[in-house]
Amino acid sequence: MIQTVSRKRIEILVDTPLVPRVVAQLKAVDISGWSVIHVDSGGGRAGEWQDDDVTGASAKTIVLAIASETKTSGLIEAIAPLLDSYGMLLTIGDVQVLRGERF
């Protein structure tokens, strides 16, 4: 039987211009793998929004990563002060992965 390992799935919804800053935080806590996913539209407490391809003013991106609990805790400590000031959304969930040594 194939064994799985528990890891954390991290999703950060962020204004697109801030993606390099989020990626820098990931690297700072030794999370070496991530994906950047463009988001076309959404809604929240402030209402609905839609990406404006002309100006990019409302562009949102999800940064997705899988990491160990230790690395995830380090990321939370590093990124928590930025959540309110930049209106980011950080979600963390439990996942099972194969090849756990990669995360």
Image (cartoon, rainbow, N blue to C red):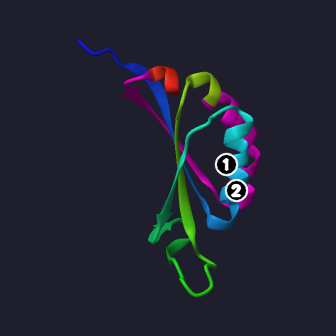
At a point 54% along the width and 83% down the height, the residue shown is 52
Question: Is 3 above or below relative to 9?
Answer: above
Q: Amino acid at mark 1?
A: Val
Q: How far across and down, in percent of the image, does residue 72 sit?
A: 61, 31
Task: Look at the image and say whether residue 66 sits in the magenta stretch.
Answer: no
Q: Is residue 85 magenta?
A: yes
Q: Is residue 77 above or below residue 3?
A: below
Judged left or right of residue 30, residue 33 is: left
Q: Is residue 58 above or below residue 32?
A: below
Q: Which residues are magenta?
A: 72-99
Quadrant containing the N terminus in the rendered view: top left
| Residue 66 image point, x, y percent | 50, 35
Question: Hey, which residue is sitting farthest bottom in the picture?
Answer: 54
**Helix, strand or loop for disc 1:** helix
Q: Taking 85 as reference, is 57 left or right? A: left
Q: Which residue is mark 2?
A: 20
Q: Taking 1 as reference, is 81 left or right?
A: right
- Residue beneath disc 1: 23
Query: Residue at horizontal 70%, vertical 30%?
Result: 74
Marks 1 and 2 in Cβ contact (< 8 Å): yes
Q: Foreground: 85 or 1? A: 1
Residue positioned 50% across, 20% down in the render: 101
Image coordinates of residue 14 in percent, x first then y, are 61, 59
